[in-house]
Image: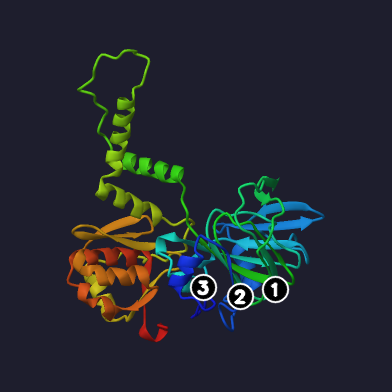
Amino acid sequence: MYQLRINDLTTAQFLSQYWQKQPLLIKSGFSNFIDPIEPEELAGLAMEESIESRLITNHNDDWQAHHGPFEDFTLLTPENSTLLVQAVDHWHPEAAQLLTPFRFIPNWRIDDLMISYSTPGGGVGPHLDQYDVFIIQGQGKRHWRVGLPDQNLKQFAKNKSLLQVEPFEAIIDSVLEPGDILYIPPGCPHEGYAVENALNYSVGFRAPDQKDLVSSFADYLIDHELGNTRYSDPDLLTPKSIGQISDTEINNVRKLMQDVLADDNTFKHWFGTMISQAKHDMDLAPLDEPLSVDDLQEYLETSEVIIRAGGVRSMYQVLRHSILLSVNGESYTLPLETLESVKLLTDETEFTVSQIKESFSRLEFMKTLTKLISEGTYYLQEDDEFE
């Protein structure tokens, strides 16, 4: 298991001083770091149809971006090339463990683990991201430069899928070695180039914008046949001009829209369902035959450990009289008495059956757990495999 050390800071101090405020270089953030994946394994993932991957090359300032799946790696030249694979946590359990030390950030904010392999000089060029990222240096070395946000920096496209930024002043200029970590807040320009063959691990975070949220909420209302209250104006007065939309009418329309947002139950159900949806296809292993609650009771008697599958998004909200558990785009209403068990489902990647035994008497909880295990989002193992 990876143990994170953020210089001499506690996680609370990091959040108050650096999170979304300024970049930070964390030397030896992981001591004695051992790569959880080999470059050959990463290349194997990039050959899969269901896995998103890219190969970036830069020869004589001719930037090219190629999208997987790849049948071979002739484009991965001995210099100036980078292979990137998204959501490796979905497919590689050992690599997925790299997310655990960063779970002092709420689950719903964590996006995925991207891994890149670069030959000397390889990178994606100077650019901006609109989300937080921790970059972990694996084998090899990589030279990083990071600046502060600058609204005047101009962006330009080296090709249609590779947006870069003009030269910037760096406040971090360092060569990272295995176990070093770089934290980069949104909007900070940065660039990294491999000094030698190198693996890098990027823990990215979700940051939906307003239009994405509004669009998703509207889709939810349509899908669930909600938001059907129509505009009305029983106190309408004779207007001075029939062509004018009055401030009163604008305020009435705004209130009509605000009212549906103010429906706490609808809003929380939408958000939990939306934010828990998997970003990428998942390699789940559903049971051949779905379990019944009675089947699960017997199953649990012969197993000791429950494990959440890699890449599964699991989170909860406390409602007035219940708990809303959201897992991979589906939400389940559970009794408040099962809160401690729900926390294990969302907060831990592995836990023992005995830890949730007190919730077995709650039929709603057992029905939900039965469905989750039948679908393969959670699965059972023997105790001797538990770490």
**Separation of residues labelled 3 and 2 (CA atoms):** 13 Å
Q: Is residue 300 left or right of residue 74?
A: left
Residue position marked by numbered label 1 in the rendering: 141
Q: Secondary structure at mark 3?
A: helix
Q: Secondary structure at mark 2?
A: loop
Residue found at x 69% / y 55%: 168
Q: Is residue 47 visible?
A: no
Earlier-in-chain disc, 1 versus 2: 1
Earlier-in-chain disc, 3 versus 2: 3
What amino acid type is highlighted by mark number 2? Answer: Asp
Residue 385: quarter of image = bottom left
Residue 230 versus residue 341 in the image, above or below: above
Circles 3 and 2: CB atoms closer than 8 Å = no
Label drawn at residue 98: 3
Q: Is residue 118 visible?
A: yes
- Comparing labels 3 and 1, the label whose residue is closer to the camera: 1
What amino acid type is highlighted by mark number 1? Answer: Lys
Residue 382: quarter of image = bottom left
Residue found at x 24% / y 64%: 367
Q: Position of residue 130 (x, y in %)?
A: 55, 53
- Residue at the limit of the structure toward the right, as seen here: 60
Residue position marked by numbered label 2 in the rendering: 180
Q: Position of residue 352 (x, y in %)?
A: 32, 80
What amino acid type is highlighted by mark number 3? Answer: Leu
Asked whether 269 or 258 is in front, the reply is 258
- Comparing labels 3 and 2, the label whose residue is closer to the camera: 2
